[in-house]
Image (tube, rainbow, N blue to C red):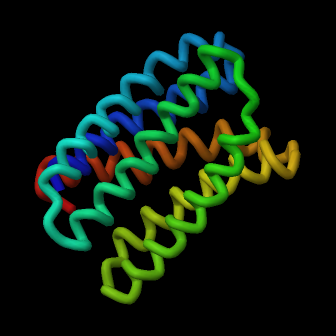
């Protein structure tokens, strides 16, 4: 779980920064830096793991990592270049579906920790779809709270646990 722990450590920090950014109205380009760093770390790690993958489970881990990594690359590029967010909203819908499927598989395997993580992450991606594509502006109000909570409780703390063999 070492690599996943590293990835989630950066995801947690970035989600907190994104949530705080929304509260404080920081310049989105400033938050884009951490999103880019996180996305590049995850995507680079996934390319390395892709080259080493030798079974379905390893490929599923790579696919999951790419979805996380490209989420942060997408956010960074949108913030840096003031792009249309709708493609990211649609991306978020498909990642939500993937995350829910992974939560179901984790439940079938009795891995309740990953059921929790995948379900919570799905909620965050679903928030993006509902806000951006369906224009449910109440979701925009929820995002900062959800981003910070997910960053702490479904990324940063699990990362610390994974990196210290407590997961």
Residue lying at 54% horizontally and 71% vertically, measured from the top left: 100
Q: Is residue 108 above or below residue 143?
A: below
**Residue toward you, 158 or 82:** 82
Counting from the top left corner in percent of width and height, residue 139 is at: 78, 47
Give the quadrant of residue 62.
bottom left
Q: Is residue 159 above or below residue 81?
A: below
Residue lying at 34% horizontally and 70% vertically, measured from the top left: 113
Counting from the top left corner in percent of width and height, residue 60 is at: 32, 65
Counting from the top left corner in percent of width and height, residue 87 is at: 70, 41
Q: How many marks?
A: 0
**Residue toward you, 108 or 26:** 108
Q: Is residue 37 left or right of residue 59?
A: right
In the picture, which quadrant includes the N terminus? Answer: bottom left
Q: Is residue 36 left or right of residue 109?
A: right
Counting from the top left corner in percent of width and height, residue 4 is at: 25, 50
Residue lying at 62% horizontally and 50% vertically, measured from the top left: 91
In the picture, which quadrant includes the C terminus? Answer: bottom left
């Amino acid at each position: 779980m070492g690599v996943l722990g590293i990835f989630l450590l950066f995801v947690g920090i970035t989600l907190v920064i994104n949530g705080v950014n929304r509260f404080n109205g920081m310049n989105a380009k400033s938050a884009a830096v951490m999103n880019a760093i996180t996305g590049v770390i995850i995507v680079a790690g996934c390319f390395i793991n892709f080259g080493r993958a030798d079974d379905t489970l390893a490929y599923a881990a790579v696919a999951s990592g790419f979805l996380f990594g490209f989420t942060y690359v997408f956010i960074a590029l949108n913030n840096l270049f003031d792009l249309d967010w709708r493609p990211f909203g649609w991306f978020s819908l498909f990642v939500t579906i993937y995350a829910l499927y992974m939560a179901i598989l984790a439940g079938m395997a009795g891995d309740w920790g990953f059921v929790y993580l995948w379900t919570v992450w799905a909620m965050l991606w679903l928030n993006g779809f509902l806000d951006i594509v369906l224009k449910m502006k109440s979701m925009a109000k929820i995002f900062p709270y959800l981003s910070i909570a997910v960053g702490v409780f479904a990324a940063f703390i699990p990362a610390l646990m994974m990196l210290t063999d407590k997961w």
